[in-house]
Amino acid sequence: MSFTDRPYLREIQLKRDNIDSFEVYPFNIPAIRELDYIEFHADVTFFVGENGAGKSTLIEAIAVAMGFNAEGGTKQSTFTTNKTHSSLYEYLKPIKSFKHPRDGYFLRAESFYNLATLMDEVGYLSSYGGKSLHQQSHGESFMATLVNKLRGDGLYIMDEPEAALSPARQMAAVSAIHQLVEENSQFIIATHSPILLAYPRAKIYQFSQTGISEVKYEDTEHYTITKDFLNHHEQMMKVLMEE
């Protein structure tokens, strides 16, 4: 495989000239309002930022623009429980590689229960390890998806996958992600996890009130706050409890 095969999704551009107003949702979110384009890493790209910063809104729009169901799953997953996704995907222009991924999946914590219910109803469990996702813990079902469902040579988009995972399971997820990267896969992940963010073959984009900027791992709040807390947890707890 040549270097130019990946990333499968090279870039997304916001079609700013098609937007009537940046004063309405989702275009009034600062990170979206300031967006021109984002270039993706061939292996892993992370979106980080506070709740409400727009990272999940953008990652959902990217997934829908690439043909995935807004509630998650493969491109063949057509179920709908609530049409709550924004129109942002209509204003994104994906720039793709000439090489098409052979596999793909949109994994989002928010609606994974609905996807698991559908898999039970249709009996399509062999690709998830042969066991009902509802008969496993949330974390176990996430790992079953990551380990069994994703086959490599794929484009995988994930929204806060750590939501169901313990720290140990997050480290196991890093290992699984790396194995899939070695099998010519590309990941785009919105996360709060300092464990996932430590993956070295990645770009990290910080979403803030001033827009979107690329940052180093050690410069993320997730790293600095976690490190400071763990190194000074007794003092930090005293301060927090006094407040």
Image (tube, rainbow, N blue to C red):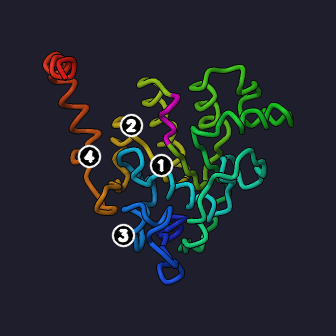
Residue occupying the point 30% across, 58% down? 209
Q: Which residue is mark 4?
A: 220
Q: Which one is earlier in the sequence, the residue at label 1 or at label 4?
A: 1
- Alpha carbons under labels 4 and 2: distance apart: 11 Å
| Residue type at the position of mark 3 | Glu
Q: In the rendered image of this protein, does residue 95 appear above or below residue 143?
A: below
Q: Horizontally, is 89 left or right of 214 in the view?
A: right
- Alpha carbons under labels 2 and 1: distance apart: 10 Å
Residue occupying the point 65% across, 45% down? 151
Q: Regarding mark 2 in the picture, which secondary structure is present there?
A: loop
Q: Regarding mark 3 in the picture, which secondary structure is present there?
A: loop
Q: Which residue is mark 3?
A: 34
Q: Which stretch appears magenta?
A: 160-164
Task: Please tell me the numbered disc located at residue 189.
Answer: 1
Q: Horizontally, is 219 left or right of 5 in the view?
A: left
Task: Please tell me the numbered disc located at residue 193.
Answer: 2
Q: Residues within 10 Å of mark 4 (few under 14, many from 20)?
A: some
- Alpha carbons under labels 3 and 1: distance apart: 20 Å
Q: Are marks 3 and 4 in contact (CB under 8 Å)?
A: no
- Alpha carbons under labels 3 and 4: distance apart: 20 Å
Q: Are marks 4 and 2 in contact (CB under 8 Å)?
A: no
Q: Are marks 3 and 1 in contact (CB under 8 Å)?
A: no
Q: Residue 215 in the image: x percent, y percent? A: 27, 55
- Alpha carbons under labels 2 and 3: distance apart: 25 Å
Q: Residue 217 in the image: x percent, y percent? A: 27, 47
| Residue type at the position of mark 4 | Thr
Q: Which one is earlier in the sequence, the residue at label 3 or at label 4?
A: 3
| Residue type at the position of mark 2 | Ser
Q: Residue pushed farthest bottom?
A: 17
Q: Regarding mark 1 in the picture, which secondary structure is present there?
A: strand
Q: Characterize the magenta stretch by its predominant secondary structure.
A: helix
